[in-house]
């Protein structure tokens, strides 16, 4: 959950009244956000520098750290936060955002070159005319860019934002991709010109903040760049803007461009930037469009500030919220959350609402999001308490609980181990070859968590290995999920519920774990039958490398192989640093259903 830091006094001034800390906490709770911390700028710096805390002086500005939902990009700045809370309190109407009505010939134009498809193929733009900045507004404008970069932009990998003083550059603009050796410009906060490849080396050594973004383009043969009509470089996204077009406190007209690999997210980011700060424009809530022209001749005009409409029935809202709300009440609650709701009646005489979603609410995608907003505005504490209808547990859950109870009654202690493990733990440490059925974790940060487990055995053995000094015998078990690749599933993998149990001690023998298998089969109502009979279960010799030859068996239940048990091989025990003999069983519980 992202946290937004805002000055308390400026926040209260914008809200039109002062609050005690408790009152503001209550307001945040009602709106669905949380006051996470109350601090000061100096206290934040002392904490970052690991200095001792000091008493807060009266002249220090109080900072409120407010935790907001991860998908509410409109709340990432003071302007959006204040607007939302004032509408929630009934102080302001819902703003109507509009695109300035100008002809296509008069619009600023951005021409996209075909080479950009090699690196960042999309760009969207807009203009804020007649903006009035002061120091606080300017800092908020810059902070919103940083927060969007860290959030929806995924550290600039999906979208990078560039903001420019329009009065210092001239349209038409071109979005190009050039070899680094052909790019020369003076970057932001620098006074000398750099060639692009030299600039990357400079940032790698001298700028820790920008260093973490270099990997996005540094291996590409071409770097994305934006030029104006006079070949003045505006930016080299996603790294840095040019110094020539840097915005300042006296900037009146702001040109915003967002380059991206994801067009949907680029439009959300652009809409968030322009809607939040169009409130400071000469024509309030009006944004000037820009025409983007692609190499194939296609073009589109951005930003798109149109209102999205969806139909949501009253019965659906009441069912999701869990309350019987009247039509007018629902409409008022939605208005508090910045959603217009117009009542209509369907053909079957069912009351429904045509809900208008503004460009600031990109998080509203489905009727359930509308119902959630109604619940927030109504108040979760106001929803009547009720007993839910009796729910019957899934058969697999019932079986798992039954097995847990029976194995525990046999003297075994339940453990819970990591579902992720290393590749060698499900392969070489168990005397197996590489397991090609395992789901591999992309870009794993540690060798301990490389794959999703395909068996419970490694976790059980690691538990014993870490507790080998515990009094013997050690009797432990686990009922948990394993995961296998499966191309027939929409997610490409499938979960299976397994049982694993281990007996560790000086007299651990085949018969001990065999007795546990028989007990499990007995409580599940599965009779012991002769080999080949599919009405019950039987055992037969097996040849698993992790178990001792001649002291292992496979369990066949109703004609299906459901698992194996036996004495753990001494080499496997040595791999997990276990000095005592162990007997082990692992069964696929889903095959018992």
Image (cartoon, grey):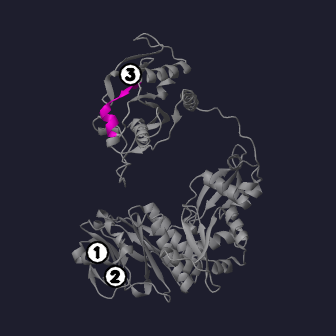
Give residue 290's mark: none
Asked if labels 1 and 2 touch by Cβ distance under 8 angstroms, the answer is no
Residue 112, position as x, y percentages in the image:
34, 70
- Is residue 552 among what the camera can see? yes
Q: Secondary structure at mark 1?
A: helix
**Residue 422 picture quarter:** top left
Precedes in sequence: disc 3 or disc 1: 1
Sequence-first disc among 2 and 1? 2
Callout 3 secondary element: strand
Structural distance between the alpha carbons of marks 3 and 1: 60 Å
Q: Check disc 1: other Cα within 10 Å, few if <14, some if 14-19, many if 20+.
A: many
Towards the viewer: 491 or 55: 55
CA–CA distance between discs 3 and 2?
A: 69 Å
Looking at the image, is mark 3 or mark 2 earlier in the sequence?
A: 2
Quarter of the view holding residue 356: bottom right
Between 355 and 403, the one lying in front of the other is 403
* In the image, residue 447 above or below residue 70: above
Residue bearing mark 2: 187
Q: Which residue is mark 3?
A: 554
Residue reaching furthest to the left: 181
In the image, which is nearer the foreground, mark 2 or mark 1? 1
The stretch in magenta equals 563-575
Q: Which residue is mark 1?
A: 200
396 on left or right of 58: left
Which of pointers 3 and 2 indicates the residue nearer the eye? Answer: 3
Would residue 371 appear left or right of 492 to someone viewing this image?
A: right
Q: Residue at x 43, y 63 (%)?
A: 154
Residue 568 in the magenta stretch? The answer is yes
* Label 3 vs label 1, nearer the camera: 3
Mark 3 is surrounded, within 10 Å at the Cα level, by few (under 14), some (14 to 19) or many (20 or more) other residues, namely: many
| Element on which disc 2 rests | loop
């Amino acid at each position: 959950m992202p946290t937004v830091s805002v000055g308390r006094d400026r926040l209260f001034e914008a809200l039109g009244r002062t609050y005690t800390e408790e009152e503001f906490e209550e307001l945040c709770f009602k709106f669905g956000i949380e006051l996470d911390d109350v601090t000061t700028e100096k206290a934040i710096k002392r904490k970052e520098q690991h200095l001792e805390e000091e008493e807060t002086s009266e002249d220090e500005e109080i900072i409120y750290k407010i935790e907001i939902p991860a998908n509410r990009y409109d709340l990432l700045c003071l302007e959006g936060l204040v607007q939302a809370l004032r509408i929630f309190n009934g102080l302001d109407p819902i703003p109507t955002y509009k695109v300035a009505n100008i002809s296509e010939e008069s619009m600023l134009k951005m021409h996209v070159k075909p080479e950009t498809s090699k690196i960042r193929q999309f760009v969207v733009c807009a203009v804020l005319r007649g903006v009035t900045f002061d120091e606080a507004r300017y800092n908020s404008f810059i902070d919103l860019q940083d927060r969007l970069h860290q959030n929806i932009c995924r550290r600039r990998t999906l979208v990078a934002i560039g903001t420019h003083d329009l009065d210092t550059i001239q349209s038409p603009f071109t979005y190009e991709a050039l070899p680094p050796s052909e790019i020369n410009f003076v970057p932001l906060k620098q006074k000398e010109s750099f060639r692009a490849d030299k600039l990357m080396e400079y940032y790698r050594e001298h700028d820790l903040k920008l260093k973490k973004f270099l990997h996005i383009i540094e291996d590409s043969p071409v770097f994305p760049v934006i030029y104006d009509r006079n070949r003045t470089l505006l930016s080299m996204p996603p790294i840095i803007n040019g110094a020539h077009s840097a915005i300042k406190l006296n900037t009146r007209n702001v040109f915003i461009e967002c380059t991206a690999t994801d067009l949907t997210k680029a439009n959300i980011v652009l809409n968030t930037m322009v809607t939040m700060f169009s409130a400071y424009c000469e024509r309030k809530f009006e944004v000037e469009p820009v025409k983007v022209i692609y190499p194939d001749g296609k073009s589109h005009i951005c930003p798109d500030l149109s209102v999205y409409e969806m139909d949501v029935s009253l019965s659906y809202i009441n069912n999701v919220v869990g309350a019987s709300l009247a039509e007018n009440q629902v409409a008022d609650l939605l208005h508090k959350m910045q959603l217009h709701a117009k009542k209509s009646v369907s053909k079957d005489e069912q009351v429904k609402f045509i809900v208008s979603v503004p460009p600031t609410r990109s998080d509203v995608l489905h009727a359930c999001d509308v119902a959630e907003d109604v619940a927030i505005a109504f108040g979760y504490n106001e929803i009547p308490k009720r007993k839910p209808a009796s729910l019957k547990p899934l058969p697999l859950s019932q079986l798992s609980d039954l097995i847990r109870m029976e194995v525990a009654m046999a003297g075994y202690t339940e453990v819970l181990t990591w579902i992720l493990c290393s590749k060698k733990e499900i392969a070489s440490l168990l005397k197996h070859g590489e397991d090609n059925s395992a789901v591999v974790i992309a870009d794993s940060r540690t060798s301990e968590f490389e794959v999703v487990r395909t068996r419970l055995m490694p976790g059980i053995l690691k538990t014993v290995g870490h507790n080998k000094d515990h009094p013997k015998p050690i009797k432990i078990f686990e009922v948990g999920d394993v995961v296998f690749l499966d191309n027939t599933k929409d997610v490409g993998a499938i979960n299976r519920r397994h049982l694993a149990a281990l007996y560790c001690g000086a007299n651990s023998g085949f018969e001990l774990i065999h007795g546990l298998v028989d007990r499990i089969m007995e409580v599940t109502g599965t009779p012991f039958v002769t080999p080949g009979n599919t009405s019950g279960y039987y055992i037969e010799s097996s040849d698993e490398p992790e178990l001792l030859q001649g002291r292992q068996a496979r369990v066949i239940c109703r004609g299906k192989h459901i698992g194996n048990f036996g004495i753990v091989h001494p080499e496997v025990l040595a791999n997990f640093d276990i000095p005592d003999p162990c007997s082990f069983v692992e069964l696929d519980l889903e095959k018992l259903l």
